[in-house]
Image (cartoon, rainbow, N blue to C red):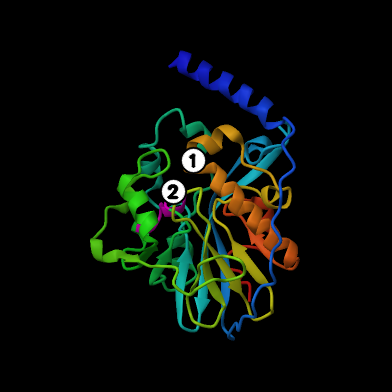
């Protein structure tokens, strides 16, 4: 084991050096203005912080400092609409310690977490009813951990992501998280047509207030949620397209070694990230929200506070 740890340490040092090397200037495609959305009164969302951690900034994006720390959050996004309530991702759940034990030992130091506070307990304490559906941005272990905490909720994934789940393995996919009755699955297509430069979309409520968009690369069926609230503000929850907002604004690729482990198709992920950056340039009021960026989440606030 000691030899293995030394090998990991050497690889990390080499990767950090490469991570700081100058990268070619990316070509950002032009974005388009977002279509108008009709956000009904009563639509709101809240970030549920289920756990956190600290890491080196350099581990979150290429060019990040190896001498500065960055906060890592594990969140679920609770959305309430007059037509229904859902979670976008689950954060870490009540069984995460058992789940974490199935991750290979070499990966656990990089995936460790603190201050566990699962979403189900927070909702129960606030007397908020459990959601009837969970839409996964993607199926990695830290986004699907709490599926078992909401046994009555339908689990929404694209067919491509379901195939990825069925063939997945630790450390990215933990099959034990998906051991539930087949009737819980809801496979959906992005069938609402092109939207804001994306070739496909799914308008969840038919009013443009909550639109799923394809973000492939990290996993084959990764999706983002574009949410419009009655104030006129718009939020784009992009899952693990980037781990830090600097990845979008830079733009910067992910930390190279980590990307090789967790991105199924890193080049596709990068091209989609550049597309999102172009969308942000064309819509400077848009809030792009990576799933793990503590600083971005802190600026929005956490459940039981709502954004509406």
Q: Residue at x 71, y 53 (%)?
A: 28
Where is residue 166 drawn, in percent x and y? 30, 49
Q: Nearer the viewer, residue 120 or 67?
A: 67
Q: Residue furthest bottom?
A: 41
Residue 110, compared with residue 88, is above or below; it is above
Instruction: Assess whether residue 16 is covered by the magenta stretch.
Output: no
Which residue is identified by label 2?
A: 140
What kind of element bears circle 1? helix
Q: As displayed, is residue 272 above or below residue 192?
A: above
Which residue is painted at 44% across and 67% down in the image? 124
User: What residue did someone put label 1 on?
Assistant: 262
Counting from the top left corner in percent of width and height, residue 294 is at 64, 51
Residue 242 in view of the camera: no
Q: Which residues are magenta?
A: 139-147
How many neighbours does mark 2 have within 10 angstroms: few (below 14), some (14-19), or many (20 or more)?
A: many
Residue 104 sits in quarter: top left
Q: Is residue 164 above or below residue 258?
A: below
């Amino acid at each position: 084991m000691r030899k293995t740890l030394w090998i990991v340490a050497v690889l990390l040092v080499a990767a950090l050096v490469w991570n700081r090397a100058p990268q070619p200037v990316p070509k950002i495609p032009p974005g388009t203005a977002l279509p108008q959305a009709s956000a009904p009164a009563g639509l709101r969302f809240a970030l549920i912080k289920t756990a956190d951690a600290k890491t080196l900034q350099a581990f979150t994006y290429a060019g990040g400092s190896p001498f500065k720390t960055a906060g890592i959050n594990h969140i679920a996004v609770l959305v309430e609409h007059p037509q229904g309530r859902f979670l976008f991702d689950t954060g870490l759940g009540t069984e995460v310690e058992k789940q974490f034990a199935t991750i290979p030992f070499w990966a656990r130091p990089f995936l460790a977490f603190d201050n566990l506070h699962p979403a189900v307990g927070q909702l129960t304490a606030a007397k908020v009813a459990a959601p009837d559906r969970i839409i996964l941005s993607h199926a990695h272990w830290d986004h699907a951990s709490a599926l078992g905490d909401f046994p009555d909720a339908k689990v929404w994934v694209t067919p491509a992501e379901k195939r990825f789940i069925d063939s997945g393995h630790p450390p990215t996919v933990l099959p034990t998280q998906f051991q539930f009755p087949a009737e819980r699955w809801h496979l959906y297509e992005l069938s609402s047509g092109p939207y804001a430069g994306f070739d496909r979309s799914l308008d969840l409520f038919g009013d443009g207030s909550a639109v799923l968009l394809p973000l492939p690369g990290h996993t084959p069926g990764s999706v983002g949620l574009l949410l419009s609230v009655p104030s006129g503000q718009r939020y784009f929850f992009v899952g693990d397209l980037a781990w830090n907002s600097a990845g979008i604004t830079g733009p910067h690729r992910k930390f190279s070694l980590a990307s090789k482990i967790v991105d199924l198709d890193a080049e596709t992920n990068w091209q989609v990230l550049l597309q999102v950056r172009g969308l942000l340039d064309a819509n400077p009021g848009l809030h792009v929200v990576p799933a793990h960026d503590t600083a971005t989440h802190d600026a929005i606030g956490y459940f039981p506070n709502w954004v509406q």
